Amino acid sequence: MTLLDKLLQLLVAVAVFAAVMGAVLFVADRARGRRTDLVSGLAFTAPALLLLLVGLLYPAGRTAVQSFFDASSAGFVGLDNYVRIFTQPDLVVVLRNTLLWVVITPILSTAIGLVYAVLVDRTRFESFAKALVFLPMAISFVGAAIIWKFVYEYRPNQQNIQQVGLLNQVLVWLGLEPVNFILVEPWNNLLLIVVMIWIQAGFAMTVLSAAIKAIPSDIVEAARLDGVGSVRMFFSITLPSIRPAVVVVITAISIAVLKVFDIVRTMTGGQFGTSVVANEFYRQTFRLSDLGMGSALAMILFVLVVPIVVYNVRQMRKVDAR
Amino acid sequence: MPAPKSGSTLRRRGTSALAAAFGVSLVLAGCAGSNVAGDGGSDAAGSEDCAAFAQYGDLSGKRVTVYTSIVAPEDQPHIDSYRPFEECTGAQIVYEGSKEFEAQLPVRVQAGSPPDIAYIPQPGLLNTLVTQNPGAVKPAPQTVAANVDQYFSETFKSAGSVDGTLYGAPLGSNVKSYVWYSPQAFEAKGYTVPQTWDEMIALSDRIVAEGGKPWCAGIGSGDATGWPLTDWLEDVMLRENGPEVYDQWVSHAIPFDDPRVAAALDRVGSILKNPAYVNGGLGDVSSIATTTFQDAGLPILRDQQCYMHRQANFYAANFPEGTDISENGEVFAFELPPIDPAQPQTILVGSEFVVAFSDRPEVQAFQAFLSSPEWSNLKAKAGSELGQSGWISANTGLDPANLSNPIDRQSVEILQDESNTFRFDGSDLMPAAVGSATFWRGMTDWITGQSTPDTLTFIEQSWPASQ
């Protein structure tokens, strides 16, 4: 592609966008009379609704239908794909791993973020300390996975061999044998989860720290005057006051965790009993060309995410209503 | 896309709309990561006269898009080798390489926007594309078929065919039955290249007795982890049971967990699962699973942490720049020896195939060009000029002298030696559900401790019922 082609593409894209915007503004502007609000509202939401229909609703419906068909979406197989997911041993492991991820990651990330936020709150080095924990948020999942892969890297303990991985080097310094961590099932799942916690704790800490700062100072002062200690202050004042924020953080992380793909793919490729639903969905669809199974896994992911999203939206409304 | 805020002036709206549009176009431009042949690179054969290209006719203003899994830096000699074709016919070749090729090609074909030409490394994938998308894949034109008949052996022709119809001519090929070793280290220790399997085991035992580790291996390869072990098993299957049984195994005429397969896998295990033999410089047996295949052979160079590494000829590209790869140099490769020396040597080979999704004249002309000896020689020269090694073609019209590296020349001679029996990589021929999935995973589980019968049963059960 030459530079001229690219420039032309750019111009076309700008022109198309301007034309669509122009049409929307024109229609909205022409609306007169009683229905002005309705027409202009529709004009502004129509492009978004159209894109949602084409880009979200239609594919979602099609995925749902495909999940009842075989690998080439030719023959109807009923619930076969779903039955396989819950019976085939390697797929059951995938479900178990996803469960591990969803249970452990949000709770630990939130707990670590919360404790950290409370500890550094109103200290002299607060912003620096927060920046330290927040930094991993700026690293992509793939980048983080590569960093941690090096942390777990294994070299045998023999002459002329230098350890590459931090953890194994520590073990060798302590006089222990290096361990090929990534192979130790099922604990290797926890090693992958650590990466996610490392990233998400910063997110939890930021949101929760803001919530803590928003606690009215009269409550805190009143508690102090009543002689409340710091532990009691945390459980009786801080935590109840920021409960909605905690819920939002937990649910947001849960959704992110259900979709986790990059970390697993980069660190193990789903080998050694570490695959998760999103990873298996990609493998089944694009490596094995099994559209039915891939769609069924996508549906399971969807079904798992929906209640969390609904709960999250309702909680956010509550927060907003305050 | 930033939505214009309510209450802002029309001018501000216009600006943000423009900004948004600009962002979109940047993304669009970013997607177009394709490369036009002829950008940079050395002038491989610019002055060559165009007589040989007259047969392809005048293709001025025509474009042919090529989609492949071959990415930088190996793509440059490909792009360079198309230049004489472009200059003489006037056609333009648009080359696009992607590491997600295997996943993306079926998507593009199903979406109705396939490339004109794709280089498919797995006949199993070709088979799936042909059977699942009737009419999408175009049979090879007469000119290509004639070239294939004249310049390629039957093994390659049948691997590029589906149900007897030729779809793809081989492009680059590889010799997989290689054991890499260090001639200098062998010389220093007084070792000789083994001619039979028993000699190879005797050599391994001798290395162990002298305090060394004979073998190193690694099968890590992202979500394709396990594939180097499938090559191991296929190579030993050929030597243990002969090509006929191998063919039956690959086509599923005998079950995957046949006792003869188990015997072959156990023989692989006699080396790779033997803690005394592996894994020089890399760890214990299970470290084979976590060592990437790229790193696995390098301990040969590092103070002889290991002495032998079974991997295809393309592994030459993994040694550090400046490594002396030659018969008396730092590294070289010998053919994995036969178990029964009375049998002819069998060579496991692989290849990618030029498959067309369009039958426009310029596409067919380019296909014919790629299957000709002229192209193989141009490609060999272009690679040599860039100092790259590890690429060879099974085209019998390829002159080994055009390859700069001794190992490449030896590989071509092996491919052109008619006393050898050739068999195509079995995992690439099997249905994708086995060959690119459970076979890999089964082998990975096997090396990390699963038993031979459990592994083979697991793979056997995954074989698609319809095939």
Image: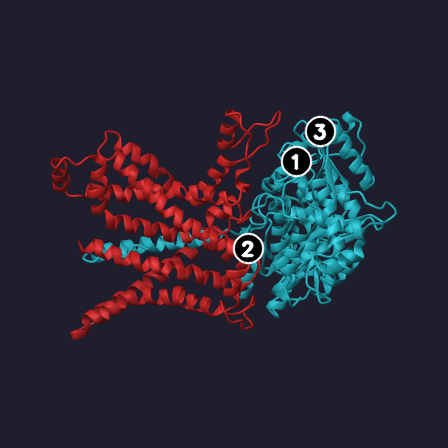
Which chain, by letter, is cyan?
B
- The percent coordinates of residue A283 (x first, y second) are 53, 56
Q: Are marks 3 and 1 in contact (CB under 8 Å)?
A: no
Q: In front here: A197 or A19? A: A197
Q: CA distance from mark 3 to mark 2?
A: 38 Å
In the rendered structure, the colour chosen for chain A is: red
The answer to whether tags 3 and 1 share a subunit is yes
Which of the chains bears the disc numbered 3?
Answer: B
Q: CA distance from mark 3 to mark 1?
A: 10 Å
Quarter of image, res B125: bottom right
Please determine whether, in this image, residue B129 is positioned above or below residue B100: below
Q: In front here: B251 or B4? A: B251
Looking at the image, which residue sits at the far right? B342
Which residue shows up at 32% across the image and 42% down it? Answer: A111
Instruction: Say whether disc 3 or disc 1 marks the residue closer to the N-terminus.
Output: 3
Classify the position of the C terminus of chain B by image quarter: bottom right
Q: Which residue is mark 1?
A: B279
Q: Amino acid at mark 2?
A: Asp
Which of the chains bears the disc numbered 1?
Answer: B
Look at discs 2 and 1 and give the one toward the viewer: 2
Q: CA distance from mark 2 to mark 1?
A: 28 Å
Which of the chains bears the disc numbered 2?
Answer: A
Q: Amino acid at mark 3?
A: Gly
Please determine whether, in this image, residue B374 is positioned above or below residue A303: above
**SS category of the residue bearing label 1:** loop
Q: Which residue is mark 3?
A: B212
- The percent coordinates of residue B343 (x first, y second) are 86, 49
